[in-house]
C-alpha cells in the first residue's frame, strides 16, 4: 500500500491524510485544496505507509496528521497513533472516523491523538477543526449530545490501568520486540549481542512482571498494555515453536 507525496506552494499548516477509503481521501484533498492556509503534503492508505510517509517528510515542516480510525492491514490505527506519538512527539494527530463508538474514540485519544473529528462533518467544520487542532486545542467535533462524558471516562479508565502497568526495562522491551518478530531466544541473542541464556533470563523476568507463563501471552499482554507497538499477529501464526527458553510458572507463595 502506498504513500503519495503531494505538493503546493507555501502554507501556514502542512498536513497529511492517512485514510483507507479512497473517496474520503479524495474528498479531503478537495476540502484542503480550497483553503490557502492549508497544504496537503501527502496521503497514505494504511498504517505502515503512513509511518513511512511521516518519516519521509521529516524536516519539511509537517505539522498535523489526520488519521482514520478504521485503518486495516497488518497494523491498526491505534498502533499507528502510538507509533507516531513515540517517534514524532511534536506532530499533532487528529483522529477521524465514521464510527461514533465511544470506546474507539477513547482508545484513539488514549493512544495519543490530540482530538477527533467525525467524517460526516461539513467541509467548513473539518477545516475549522484542523485549524483549531493545529493551534493546540483539544478538538472533539461531531460528537452526539452527551457523548463527551463517556469518552472522557473511557480515557480516564485507560489511564488508571496504565498507572498500574508493570514497568519493563529498555532491554526487556527490546527482547519483546524481537520476540514479536518471531525470533527464537538464540536469534534474539544474536540480534541484541547477548547470550541465549541472558535472553531466557530477560523473558522470565518479563513473564513474572506480566503475570503470564508463555511468550505469546507475554506479547499479547504487552501489546494490550501499550508496552510495545509491534503486533503479535506474526508470532501467533508461527508454530509453537522453536521456543527454546523455559516458561516461567508462578508458584503460589
Image: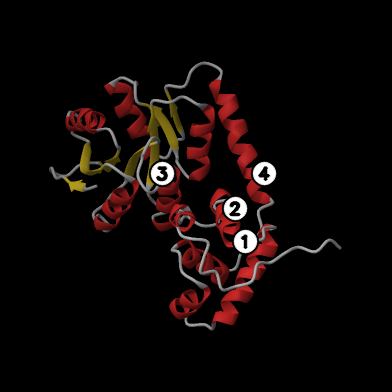
2 vs 1, front mark: 1
1 vs 3, front mark: 1
Q: Quadrant of the C terminus?
A: bottom right
4 vs 1, front mark: 1
| Marks 2/1: CA–CA distance | 11 Å
Tag 2–tag 1 contact (CB < 8 Å): no
Q: Residue furthest right?
A: 253
- The residue tagged 4 is 160
Q: Judge from the rendering whether residue 237 lies leftward or rightward of residue 146; answer left or right.
A: left
Please report whichever mark, 2 or 4, sits nearer to the chain's N-terminal start: 4
Q: Position of residue 246 (x, y in %)?
A: 64, 71
Disc 4 crowd, CA 10 A, few/some/many (<14, 14-19, 20+): few
- The residue tagged 3 is 76
Disc 3 crowd, CA 10 A, few/some/many (<14, 14-19, 20+): some
Tag 1–tag 3 contact (CB < 8 Å): no
Determine which of the numbered discs, if any, sits on residue 214 in the image.
Answer: 1
Q: Judge from the rendering whether residue 33 lies leftward or rightward of residue 111; answer left or right.
A: left
For the point 61% across and 41% down, which residue is it? 158
| Marks 2/4: CA–CA distance | 16 Å
- The residue tagged 2 is 221
| Marks 3/4: CA–CA distance | 23 Å
Disc 2 crowd, CA 10 A, few/some/many (<14, 14-19, 20+): some
Q: Judge from the rendering whether residue 44 lies leftward or rightward of residue 110; answer left or right.
A: left
Determine which of the numbered discs, if any, sits on residue 79 in the image.
Answer: none
Q: Position of residue 37 (x, y in %)?
A: 22, 36
| Marks 3/2: CA–CA distance | 17 Å
Amino acid at each position: 500500500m502506498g504513500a503519495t507525496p503531494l505538493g503546493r506552494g507555501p502554507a501556514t499548516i502542512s498536513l497529511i491524510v492517512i485514510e483507507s477509503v479512497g473517496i474520503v481521501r479524495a474528498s479531503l484533498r478537495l476540502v484542503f485544496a480550497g483553503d490557502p492556509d492549508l497544504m496537503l503534503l501527502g496521503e497514505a492508505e494504511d498504517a505502515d505507509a503512513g509511518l513511512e510517509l511521516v518519516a519521509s517528510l521529516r524536516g519539511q515542516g509537517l505539522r498535523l496528521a489526520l488519521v482514520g480510525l478504521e485503518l486495516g492491514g497488518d497494523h491498526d490505527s491505534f498502533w499507528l497513533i502510538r507509533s507516531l506519538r513515540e517517534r514524532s512527539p511534536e506532530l499533532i494527530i487528529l483522529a477521524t472516523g465514521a464510527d461514533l463508538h465511544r470506546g474507539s474514540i477513547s482508545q484513539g485519544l488514549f493512544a495519543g491523538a490530540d482530538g477527533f473529528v467525525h467524517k460526516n462533518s461539513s467541509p467548513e467544520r473539518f477545516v475549522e477543526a484542523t485549524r483549531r487542532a493545529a493551534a493546540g486545542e483539544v478538538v472533539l467535533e461531531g460528537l452526539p449530545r452527551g457523548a463527551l462524558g463517556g469518552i472522557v471516562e473511557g480515557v480516564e479508565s485507560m489511564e488508571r490501568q496504565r498507572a498500574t502497568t508493570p514497568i519493563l526495562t529498555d532491554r526487556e522491551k527490546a527482547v519483546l520486540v524481537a520476540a514479536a518478530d518471531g525470533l527464537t531466544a538464540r536469534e534474539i541473542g544474536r540480534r541484541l549481542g547477548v547470550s541465549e541464556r541472558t535472553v531466557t533470563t530477560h523473558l522470565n523476568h518479563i513473564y513474572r512482571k506480566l503475570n503470564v507463563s508463555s511468550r505469546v501471552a507475554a506479547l499479547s499482554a504487552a501489546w494490550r498494555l501499550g508496552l510495545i507497538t509491534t503486533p503479535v499477529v506474526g508470532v501467533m501464526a508461527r508454530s509453537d515453536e522453536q521456543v527454546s527458553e523455559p516458561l516461567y510458572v508462578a508458584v503460589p507463595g
